[in-house]
Image: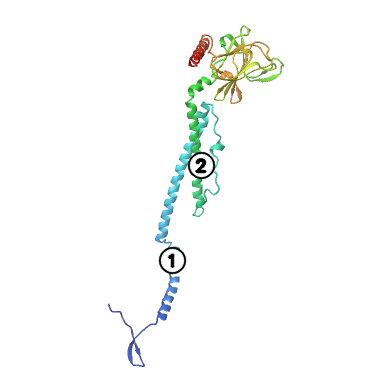
């Protein structure tokens, strides 16, 4: 197509001539139009956004993305709360059921809920808008992972103990130390009047006295274990034997006529460890028996069946004696 030409009448030459615009004039006109377009654009935007409350497509897209992200964040928060509550339920069950069953101490909340160490761990989010929200979510997820790890380790410990449940059942001191049919309980666990000095005292065990008042009755280990102490104290327990059963349990047998085991011996539940006597601070023939759990003396009566006596008890003791002899013979053969 032909470019349109513009003609102007020149009075000097009395002729029409092609009208030419200089480059400087062209630039000045364009620049003026540009300057005028700026306030017009701003005015248009003001009318569009402030007066008519309209949004441009980019803002609409960003708002949609923001709403989508907030929705996802809300879903993540709900999931976090659900998983965290499930983990709390596992922690409560672990502390109140699983660990106590096997004599394990509960894990303190200070350890379970201890924070994550690390300077500047979340500094990577500082450049983002709403960084506090992102930091809070990341911190909570880290805590969830840490608590889950601690819980997993706890279950590993419980599993190891559970695999040794047979050994645990044989180690817990759950039979009487003497044949109850031949005995009477002369002093129970708890506060009493001191039989020697008078006055109130806390009696840390249970005393068994023979009905015939004679010394020499057999005293038996109430659980499998290792003899960790055999000693004599004139002003105290006299001849005593202390056995460590593992799993936090120990038992003491005091005022014996004489011990029949030595320090370091391994004993079976029901095996004879001494004869009843009246050594040390004692007013008569009896056995002072203690159950110690995690360094705390507890009531022995809560650990044994009071009906386990007479023929049943004697048969059990004989079976243990026979089993011990067979094991001794087997050891000799192996040597």
Q: Is residue 62 left or right of residue 203?
A: left
* Residue 70 or residue 140, whichever sits in front: 140
Provide the secondary structure element on which disc 2 rests: helix
* Image quadrant in which you'd find residue 181: top right
Question: Which mark, by number, is residue 324?
Answer: none
Q: Is residue 135 visible?
A: yes
Q: Residues within 10 Å of mark 2 (few under 14, many from 20)?
A: some
Q: Position of residue 107 (x, y in %)?
A: 54, 33
Inter-mark Cα distance, 2 to 1: 48 Å
- Tell me the colour scheme of the image: rainbow
Residue found at the far front of this picture: 335
In this rendering, is residue 120 above or below 152?
Answer: below
Q: Position of residue 84 (x, y in %)?
A: 48, 39
* Residue 308 or residue 218, whichever sits in front: 218
Residue found at the far left of this picture: 1
* Residue 124 or residue 132, whichever sits in front: 124
At 49% across and 46% down in the image, what residue appears? 138
Sequence-wise, the earlier of marks 2 and 1 is 1
Q: Position of residue 314 (x, y in %)?
A: 53, 10
Provide the secondary structure element on which disc 1 rests: helix
Question: Which mark, by number, is residue 45?
Answer: 1
In this rendering, is residue 227 above or below 87?
Answer: above
At 48% across and 26% down in the image, what residue appears? 162
Mark 2 or 1: the one toward you = 2
In this rendering, is residue 188 above or below 30?
Answer: above
Q: How many numbered marks appear?
A: 2
Q: Is residue 93 visible?
A: no
Q: Quadrant of the N terminus?
A: bottom left
At 61% across and 25% down in the image, what residue appears? 296
Q: Is residue 187 left or right of residue 36?
A: right
Question: Which mark, by number, is residue 143?
Answer: 2
């Amino acid at each position: 197509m032909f470019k349109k030409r513009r003609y102007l009448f020149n009075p000097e030459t009395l002729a029409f001539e092609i009208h030419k615009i200089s480059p400087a004039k062209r630039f000045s006109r364009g620049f003026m139009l540009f300057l005028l377009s700026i306030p017009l654009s701003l005015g248009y935007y003001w009318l569009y956004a402030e007066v008519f409350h309209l949004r441009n497509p980019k803002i609409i897209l960003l708002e949609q993305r923001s709403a989508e992200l907030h929705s996802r964040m809300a879903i993540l928060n709900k999931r976090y709360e659900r998983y965290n509550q499930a983990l709390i339920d596992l922690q409560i069950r672990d502390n109140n059921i699983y660990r106590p069953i096997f004599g394990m101490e509960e894990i303190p909340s200070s350890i379970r809920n201890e924070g994550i160490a690390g300077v500047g761990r979340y500094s990577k989010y500082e450049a983002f808008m709403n960084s506090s929200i992102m930091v809070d979510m990341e911190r909570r997820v880290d805590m969830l992972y840490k608590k889950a790890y601690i819980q997993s380790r706890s279950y590993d410990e419980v599993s190891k103990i559970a695999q040794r449940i047979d050994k645990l059942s044989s180690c817990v001191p759950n039979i009487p130390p003497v044949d109850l049919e031949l005995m009477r309980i002369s002093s129970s666990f708890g506060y009493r009047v001191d039989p020697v000095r008078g006055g109130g005292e806390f009696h840390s065990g249970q005393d068994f006295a023979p009905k015939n008042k004679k010394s020499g009755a057999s005293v038996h280990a109430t659980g499998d274990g290792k003899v960790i102490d055999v000693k004599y104290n004139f002003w105290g327990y006299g001849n005593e034997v202390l056995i460590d059963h593992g799993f936090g349990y120990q038992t003491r047998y005091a005022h014996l006529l004489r011990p029949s085991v030595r320090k370091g011996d391994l004993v079976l539940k029901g095996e004879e460890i001494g004869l009843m006597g009246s050594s040390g601070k004692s007013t008569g023939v009896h056995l002072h028996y203690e159950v110690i759990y995690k360094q705390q003396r507890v009531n022995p009566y809560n650990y044994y069946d009071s009906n386990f006596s007479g023929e049943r008890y004697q048969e059990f003791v004989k079976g243990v004696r026979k089993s011990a002899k067979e094991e001794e013979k087997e050891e000799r053969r192996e040597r």
